Structures are given as structure tokens and as C-alpha cells.
Amino acid sequence: MGKAFTEEEKEAIRRRLQDEGLKQFKEKGLKKVSVRELTQAVGIAQGGFYTFYENKEALLIDCVNRRITEKIKAFMDSPMEQYKEEMQDPVHFLAERMYATGIRLKDNLVFNNLISDSVNILLGDCDNLEQNSVRVIKELLIRLIDWWKAHGLTVTVDTGGLRAFMKAAAVLFMNEEIIGKQYFPEIYYAFVYENTARYFQVTGTFQS
């Protein structure tokens, strides 16, 4: 019988699996990463992987949830005033942030749908993603909206439209090869900016 892990040991192993998953998924894409490689790197038996995850796709979802949460919390922990100049135009600020985040991820092979089948996996498990990531996204939006209100702007969000837009942006983003690398940046930027302006309505005048 294998060793029974304490809750603290389980959490530490889960964290190491996520660390290794983030690294290997980025370098190889989902399809070329094996459970054996993951568990060897972490130092547990291959069968031990299934104590934590049903399959490597479930690990991928956990990795994406973790990365989204970490990025948003890092932003929320920083003083909002340092972004004051950029944030005078909420639509421009939000569109630029979403676009820049996407472009930075283009070298991550897990987001290449031809290599990783990422659209079907990530969008096929939206409930999991939303339970873990949407909460921190909502917290961020509330903080941003409160900050803008304190500076004379009222920002309202069509939440249903925003969720649909983010799913559509993910499909577009993960299929760059179909669109063509030459044209992808300008098409992706136009899509992000137009829909940010559609689902975030801004009234008022910015007051410093």
C-alpha cells in the first residue's frame, strides 16, 4: 500500500504538479506532455498523479485558474494611483490590458489550438474556470469601477456580453495559425477594442 499523504503534503504535491505543468505545457503543448514526465519531475509515482487529478486536462484547468488568479491579485495588490494616467480612459485601459496579456501568451504552446486542442478543453470546462477565476475577475472589476467612480466616471458592465466576448476572444486567440500570423495582431486588437467598448459603457468626465 502506498504512503498516505497528510493534507499539507497533498497541497505541496499539488502545487509542485502545477509548477511543473505550467512549465511543460508552455514548452510542449498539452498533447506532448505525459503524466509519466510530470510525476517523474515532481518525484511521485505515476499512479499517484490520479490522487490529485483525473487527467492532465484537469491539471491544465487548475494551472490556468492559478495563473489568472495570481496575475489579478498581483495587480490588485499594487497602488491604483500608479496607473492613473492610463486609467483616464477606461475602455482604452481595459482593451490594452487584455490585448497585451494575450500577445504575451502567444509563445505558450498550450494556447496553440493545433498543438493542444485548447479550445475544446478550456471552453469545455467553463464551469470549473468560472468557479475559480471569475470570482477574482469580479473582484478586480469592482475595485476598478469603484476607483473610476471616485474620479468622476461611471462604468457599467454588460456581464453576459462580457462573458460571451471573453469566450470568443479565447477562440480567436487560440487559432492564430488559421487566421495567419501576419494579420493576427491587428485583427485581434480590433476585436478586443471594439467589444470592450461595446460591453463597458462609460459616462462622466475624469477628475484627477
Image (cartoon, rainbow, N blue to C red):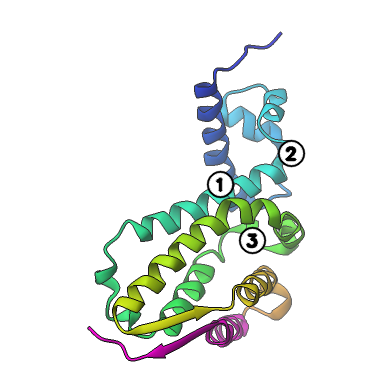
Q: Point out the frontmost of discs 2 and 3.
A: 2
What residue is at 65 percent from the left and 47 percent from the top? 60
Instruction: Give the class, few, some or many, for how many residues have Cα within 10 Å of label 2's Cα (few <14, many ≥20).
Output: few
Q: Is residue 194 left or right of residue 88?
A: right
Q: Quadrant of residue 85?
A: bottom left
Residue 146 on image: x %, y % = 37, 71
Is residue 201 a member of the stretch shown in magenta?
yes
Q: From the image, which quarter does the C terminus lie in?
A: bottom left
Identify the residue at image location x=25%, y=71%: 81
Residues at marks 3 and 1, CA–CA distance in whole angstroms = 12 Å
Secondary structure type for disc 3: helix
- Mark 3 Cα within 10 Å, few/some/many (few <14, many 20+)? many
Residue that badge 2 annotates:
55
Look at the picture and state if 203 lies above or below 25.
below
Residue depicted at 38% across the width and 85% down the height: 89
On screen, 104 above or below 155?
above
Q: Earlier in the sequence, mark 2 or mark 1?
A: 1
For residue 206, above or below residue 31: below
Numbered range of the magenta stretch: 182-208
Disc 1 target residue:
22
User: Which mark is first along the chain, 3 or 2?
Assistant: 2
Q: How far is mark 2 from mark 3, CA to CA?
A: 18 Å
Q: Which mark is residue 111?
A: 3
Q: Secondary structure at mark 1?
A: helix
Q: Amino acid at mark 1?
A: Leu
Residue type, numbered disc 3: Phe
Residue at position x 29%, y 68% in the image: 80
The local crowd at label 1, few if under 14, some if 14 to 19, many if 20 or more residues have their Cα within 10 Å, is many
- The amino acid beneath tag 2 is Asn
Q: Is the N terminus in the top left, top right, bottom left or bottom right quadrant?
A: top right
Numbered circles on residues, count: 3
